[in-house]
Amino acid sequence: MAADSPVMILLVGMTGAGKTTFASLASGRADLEIGTGLDPCTQDPCAVEFKLRNRTVILIDTPGFDDDARSDVEILESIAKWMVKQGYSKQQPLDGLILLHPIFAANGLDSGTERKRTRILQKILGEDAYRRVVIATTMWGVLNDEEDAQRDIHARWTRGGVWDEFRRGGSTMVRHYNTKESTHRILQSIIDRSDEAGRTQSQIQRDLAKKNVRFRDTAIGEELSDQLDEEICLIQNQLLEHRRERPPDSWRKSRNRAQREMWKEWDDEYSDLVKSLQARQAASKKMNSYLVSVFFIILPTLHI
């Protein structure tokens, strides 16, 4: 990569990881909206441009994962659409990705959600791009038991852990100290790797090169399809179990208030399960009909 070319880096992570704080510290901009606690703050991506050692850095702050209103897939899709709309996918490719992870979330060590999210990122990037990924752990200053947190993070990073594949592919893991100097060290490490190794194609780019390929047959399509199939199966089993627990029909209009409330609670839960199943079945059906060239028009071109 030319020494004077701009560098674009994507910030991702769960809600409360400190993405906007990272962007504010790195850029020196105090006007960025920063949330508190686990409340979602950044609802849409935001590009922050600044200079680092005379290099132009474009840092993309993104919505947090674990949003009750949107799934991780919907958040990734919103990021992709925004990048295409802003013209970044064509005019300025990504050079790296920073995954911020708050240390207080380490107790969810092997949660299914975390592993699914990690697999999605891996399938989008492809193994050749792992070396441009930095996993930065945050919130170390609020810990009561640092040794316990270190063990949890170590388990994520070692063999069999949720980040093991990133580690083996050349990603790096660092501790972010919530300072300007810390943010600049992390960013500089990505810049140095891009300058030394040049750019490489991501898995998305390789899939884009294929013609008339069904989305379900691409790397990310297979992963999302498998996840949808797992969720459909799980909800179907939940529905079967829920039907076995159905209260007597007479309770629906019973004079006994407790019985009426139990019926309504069961009926509401049943309706929610049905809606969830229908939404996932519709998404699966749509996925089967997508051509890769149609679907990926909403996804960024990652030259990392």
Image (spheres, grey):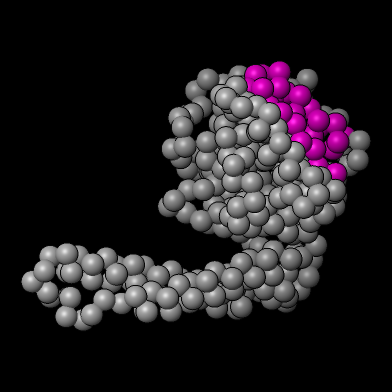
Is there any visible trace of residue 30 in the rendered image?
A: yes
- Eyeballing the image, is 265 above or below 254? above
Q: Is residue 184 magenta?
A: yes
176 displayed left or right of 289: right
Residue that sits furthest to the right in the current view = 196
- The image quadrant that residue 298 belongs to is bottom right
269 displayed left or right of 291: left
Q: How many marks?
A: 0
Residue that sits furthest to the left in the current view = 255
Depth check: give the residue in front, 154 or 176: 154
Identify the residue shown where x is 59% and y is 42%. Answer: 107
Q: Position of residue 62 (x, y in %)?
A: 57, 41
Q: Position of residue 3 (x, y in %)?
A: 86, 30
Depth check: give the residue in front, 2 or 98: 98
- Eyeballing the image, is 232 above or below 81? below
Depth check: give the residue in front, 221 or 37: 37
- Eyeballing the image, is 268 above or below 101? below
Q: Position of residue 261 (x, y in %)?
A: 19, 65
Is there any visible trace of residue 82 in the rendered image?
A: no
The rendered magenta stretch, by its main secondary structure, is classed as helix
Identify the residue shown where x is 68% and y is 39%. Answer: 152
Depth check: give the residue in front, 165 or 7: 165
Identify the residue shown where x is 58% and y is 26%. Answer: 143
Identify the residue shown where x is 48% and y is 77%. Answer: 236
What residue range appears in magenta? 170-195
Q: Is residue 193 magenta?
A: yes
- The image quadrant that residue 260 belongs to is bottom left
- The image quadrant that residue 112 belongs to is bottom right
Q: Position of residue 268 (x, y in %)?
A: 29, 67
Name the quarter where the N terminus is drawn.
Answer: top right
